[in-house]
Image (cartoon, rainbow, N blue to C red):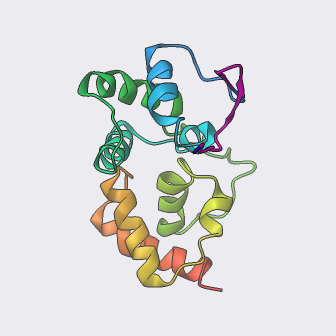
Amino acid sequence: MRILVRFSGVLLAGQIVFSQTLPPGPGGDVLKSRCVICHDADIITSQQLSLTGWTNSINKMVRWGSQITPEEREILQPYLTANFGPKPAASHPTAQNQAPAPSAAEGTYKRACVVCHDADIIEQQKLSKTGWTRSVEKMMRWGASVTEAEKEPLVDYLAGRFPPR
């Protein structure tokens, strides 16, 4: 019996050629040998997680059966953070082109959500308030910089802006 698995690469004479070039380094080798065997590289590289987020993600994968060794984790986690960590926050607008001041919740959304996720991914969720609460709490556990005081206003903002269909 032969099983074929789709992933971001092409199999040529027993050698995998990846469609996305990963930054060089030992972490890239671990990523290719342990992660890209199950996931498309772009799913991994688009996450933009903090070190805490990558650590939690790898912990989850290990719980689900990934064979990442402790030594490989020590190489992989900093590699992922350095190459696929959160984007730097956008600079503030100048006085000439300053937009109206956003609400605190909108500011939290831009600072803590859009820095790691493309806005269209968030907008497509269309969750209830309960669903947004679960999602925000999960992101907080994974290292999102949202305080307890910011959580409820952020959930209200998301539920109001991206409600269920």
Q: Residue 34, position in %: x, y?
A: 44, 31
Q: Is residue 76 left or right of residue 101?
A: left
Observer-nearest of 150 and 113: 113
- Seen from this angle, which residue lies furthest front? 1
Q: Residue 163, position in %: x, y?
A: 59, 83
Q: Residue 85, position in %: x, y?
A: 48, 35
Residue 147, quarter of picture:
bottom left
Observer-nearest of 85 and 27: 27
Look at the image and say whether residue 7 sits in the magenta stretch.
Answer: yes
Q: Residue 1, position in %: x, y?
A: 57, 45
Above/below status of 93 relative to 131: above
Which residue is found at the position 54% from the left and 35% from the top? 36
The quadrant in which the C terminus is found is: bottom right
Look at the image and say whether residue 98 sits in the magenta stretch.
Answer: no
Which residue is found at the position 68% from the left and 44% from the top? 94
Q: Is residue 21 left or right of residue 117?
A: right
Which residue is found at the position 59% from the left and 64% from the top? 122
Above/below status of 131 relative to 70: below
Residue 101, quarter of picture:
bottom right
- Seen from this angle, which residue lies furthest top? 25
Count of numbered circles on the image: 0
Above/below status of 61 relative to 74: below
| Magenta part of the chain | 2-17
Observer-nearest of 34 and 15: 15
